[in-house]
Amino acid sequence: MKKALSVILALVMVLGIFSAPLNHSYASTTTLQVTTSNLNVRDSIWGSRIGSVYKDEKHTSLESKKDSSGDTWYAISYQGKKGWVHGDFVKVSSTSSTTSNSLGKLTVTTSVLNVRDKVWGSVVAQVKQSEVFTYSETVKDSKGDNWYKIEKGWVHGDFVKAEPTATEKPPATTPPVLGKLTINADALRVRTSAWGSYLTTVYKGSVYDYYSSQKAGDGTMWFQIEVDGQKGFVHGGYVLFAKAPSNPTPPATPTPPKETVAGRVKVTTSALNIRNNIWGTWIKTAYEGEVYDYLSTAKDSSGKTWYKIKVGSSSGWVHGDFVKVESTSPAPPAGSSDKTVIGSLNVTTSVLNVRDDLWGKWIGQTYNSTQHHYYSTKKDSSGNTWYEIGFAGGSGWIHGDFVSLSGSNPIHSGNVVAKSSGVSDVYALEEFSLEVTLKDSAGKALTGRASRLGATVSGAERPSLITVGAFKEVSAGVYRASARINDSHQRVTFTFTLDGQSLKESATVNSTASEFQERWLDQNVGTYMNLDGIYGYQCKDVLDYYSNDMYGNYRTIVGRGDAKDLFYGPSDQYFIKIRREATGVNSIPKMGDVIIYGGGSRNPAGHLSIVISATATSIRVLEQNANGAGSSPAMYATRPYSGGSSGEVIGWLRPRVHKINNTN
């Protein structure tokens, strides 16, 4: 668990880390900055998705084109290929010709600082206190923290002292400040003018100076603020004034509109934290099966949906991965109840936008495997079919390329008696069978229904990793489908459907670690692990062996560092990083997790081991070098969560089992 200081210093000298970075010339370019949390990259305009780029990332535009609707698309270089992104979700700027891309110099102010491949990305290098680098770019993350791009990658601004170059132009003179305002909505769009084009998003509690106001055609007041160097307008209905405007005819202080109930959600996990804000402070716990009214939705910096629910006389936020949206709304708008249902459909993509008309205003989202009734269909100018569905107590329109029809006038499930028979616990990656029996109300077996049967999935953290095959009739009225959960530690509910309608019968399946992981923990007791050949048999060597045996590699997946550093370092493609919480689903690790201690006074480097089982007070593990001598093989042990020489558990790495390529 020592740090390989001599090796690192040798590499530093060989690679010239202490040499002055070079400045590079570049010509005039068009730069795109991503303004949404997750933006699809496609192989052509409206083509197949080949990947994603993320908020605040900057890319050079290779060319631009317009689609049939007049929307602009930009070509960028993505993983060595040409890809296309939609222009509505990027900010375009032109970089003038210059002789240097250096904005200034920075000095490292902490002992060791991680360098990442992007903001909060994977660790690619480390720099040390007092080292000086030039920086060529600076951005803010979702929390408003500054990051600087040096020749090795990105570093966090809290741990450097930055000095802009003397030639850098001073900021442009700003108009006089009229007052201050506070954002009073969970997420509020900033626009170029009243109801103008989208620029960026600001969040609740943020305070800004404002410089002017506009009155829109609908009578609403808008106020100009500055965000990250660009000015835009925010809706006055969602701000509070820190002090009254100083102009002679100030508008009245706006009152935020009263929130109305948008729908209902049902908790699908055993215990779910309710927070005072998105990723905010815990205020209460909700439990499986409980149903709550929700008032609004918002997305976090990772693109995950959260729901603001009513909790008694107050409200709180819950993560959308652990709730299911109920199909009915307590207060449907007038006019929706007289629509005639002509069929039902299922959503076939992970997230699908719901709009107020064909290519109209965004009003919400629906998700993979969600079933909806539809009232009517239309075709857009390109010949694509759209469906009007029941949504949030009213109706909305979704694109037909991302749904599968269940047929018109489906058989009502009340005419069918269904009984499920399924497994309760499986290994991740193990194939198992789901079984359902169909009878009519008189008890007669219903045959020939295989093609009309299906199963919807709920409760999974990552539904895309759940597969269900087609149903086959194995005997009169008895149907089976093969399924697999390509993820560990999931509690998945499969609800059976006939013609897209729920049969009110379900099978709940729990997935544990993969069979390969369990075998690995059994077979490697007494193994001397030292793949890197440095410092004997260290605790990190166990993670190296574990990664190498699962994924066929460890150097690029695990990386370097002390045990405590490895909560942050390993590749996100292969490990899910879970920070320990005091209560709830993230308070106890599971079999196969890599538990990491943050270091103590006697062992500041920390410690790591592989979990066999755990309770609220102790953890059974496979570990190496528990005594610090580096001379003993991997052995079983029982550890506390805190109080030992290695400090306190900060969290654990959960392997992405669907990436395992070794089944021996």
Image: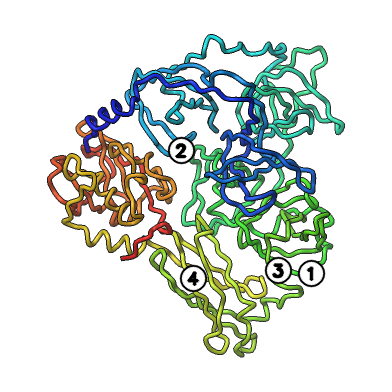
Q: Nearer the viewer, mark 1 or mark 4?
A: 4
Residue sitting at 38 percent across and 39 percent down? Answer: 568
**Which badge, 3 or 1, comes first in the chain's sequence?**
1
Marks 1 and 4, the one that precedes in the sequence? 1
> Which numbered disc, 3 or 2, marks the residue that appears first in the sequence?
2
Q: Nearer the viewer, mark 2 or mark 1?
A: 2
Q: Considering only vertical position in the picture, is 525 above or below 444?
A: above
Q: Amino acid at mark 1?
A: Ile
Secondary structure under the numbered disc 2 in the rendered image: loop
Q: Which residue is mark 3?
A: 405
| Residue linked to disc 1 | 342
Q: Amino acid at mark 2?
A: Gly
Q: Where, by quadrant of the figure, is residue 651 drawn?
A: top left
Q: Are marks 2 and 1 in contact (CB under 8 Å)?
A: no
**Residue 226 as seen in the image, left or right of residue 649:** right
Q: CA distance from mark 3 to mark 1?
A: 11 Å
Disc 4: which residue:
483
Where does the image place residue 389, in percent across and percent down from the top left? 75, 60
Tell us which disc is closer to us: 3 or 1: 3
The secondary structure type at the circle numbered 4 is strand
Mark 2 vs mark 4, foreground winner is 2
| Label 3: few (<14), some (14–19) or many (≥20) C-alpha neighbours in 10 Å | some
State the separation of the CA atoms marked 2 and 4: 34 Å
Q: Which residue is mark 2?
A: 121
